[in-house]
């Protein structure tokens, strides 16, 4: 079994487990367990989710700082110029928005005021900032949701789209980076909507802990799926001198 095959199987297993966890939520939500309340419960849940959002913002703004030092060492020295005989055939490959400037990655970035940004990271950061504002209002200032049942199902759909975004891109042949921004922002916002609606309706600390752990796993799955998608793109790359060819 090749390393690529093992990687694909790992991604599929992670996606399957994430979808199973998401699929169990309606059953738990509609069959709400007895309330289990501890002192300062909402504040503790709010602090935990706030921490997740802040770490996500840091990772989205500076993703290179979140890689292991060993990974950095492995990728050093791989930025090379194409051989002389191919310079006229292929333009120089650079990295913008921490993606290479080649056609297959065009939908992974977007331009704003003549600068190039990673669409996925921008969406995650945007969603995390919005979720932080909502978390502060809900958990620390006591603002309640209107129609929490509808809010739950809205969050359910948002998270589902976020987890299945890569199949959606391939199925509908989406080529716009701003679509990735919106989908990834909704992915984070959906997690926030599910958490707050279940807290308001069930008030069960065990359910909330399960959700927080599940949200962390959703984020992990989103990361491994993104890396897998990048590896698939680079595996088909025939341009010499690409900075990500062997990373």
Image (cartoon, rainbow, N blue to C red):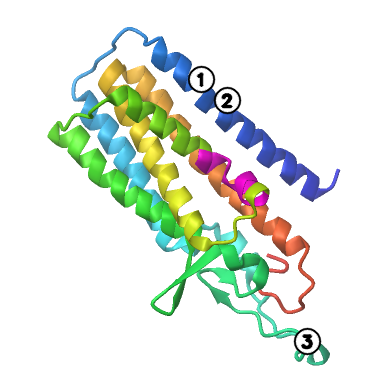
Asked if labels 1 and 2 touch by Cβ distance under 8 angstroms, the answer is yes
Which residue lies under the disc numbered 3? Answer: 89
Q: Callout 2: helix, strand or loop?
A: helix
Tell me where residue 99 sits by quadrant. bottom right
Q: Picture coordinates of residue 113 (x, y %)? A: 38, 77
Q: Can you tell which of label 3 and label 2 is closer to the viewer?
A: 3
Task: Place residue 202 in its image quadrant.
Answer: top left
Identity of the residue drawn at 58% across and 41% down: 164
Q: Quadrant of the N terminus?
A: top right
Part of the protein shown in magenta? 161-170
Name the residue at 47% across, 14% down: 27
Give the side of residue 157 with respect to residue 135, left or right: right
- Give left or right: position of 75 versus 30: right
Q: CA distance from mark 3 to mark 2?
A: 47 Å
Q: Residue at x 61, y 51 (%)?
A: 169
Reading the image, the residue beneath label 2 is 20
Image height of 134 relative to 203, above or below: below
């Amino acid at each position: 079994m090749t390393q690529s095959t093992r990687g694909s199987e790992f991604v599929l297993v992670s996606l399957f487990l994430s979808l199973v966890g998401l699929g169990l939520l309606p059953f738990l939500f509609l069959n709400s367990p007895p309330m289990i309340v501890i002192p300062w419960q909402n504040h503790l849940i709010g602090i935990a989710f706030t921490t997740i959002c802040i770490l996500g913002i840091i990772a989205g703004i500076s993703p290179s700082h979140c890689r292991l030092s060993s990974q950095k060492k492995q990728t050093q020295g791989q930025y090379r110029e194409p051989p002389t005989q191919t310079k006229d055939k292929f333009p120089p490959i650079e990295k913008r928005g921490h993606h290479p400037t080649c056609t297959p990655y065009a939908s992974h970035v977007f331009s704003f005021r003549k600068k190039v940004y990673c669409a996925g990271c921008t969406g995650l950061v945007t969603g995390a900032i919005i979720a932080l504002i909502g978390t502060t209002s809900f958990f620390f200032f006591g603002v309640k949701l209107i129609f929490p049942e509808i809010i739950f199902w809205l969050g359910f759909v948002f998270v589902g789209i976020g987890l299945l975004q890569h199949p959606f891109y391939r199925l509908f042949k989406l080529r716009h980076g701003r679509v990735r921004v919106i989908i990834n922002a909704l992915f984070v916002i959906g997690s926030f909507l599910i958490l707050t609606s279940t807290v308001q309706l069930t008030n069960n600390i065990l359910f909330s802990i399960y959700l927080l752990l599940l949200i962390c796993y959703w984020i992990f799955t989103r990361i491994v799926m993104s890396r897998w998608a990048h590896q698939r793109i680079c595996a088909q790359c025939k341009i010499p001198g690409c900075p990500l060819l062997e990373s």
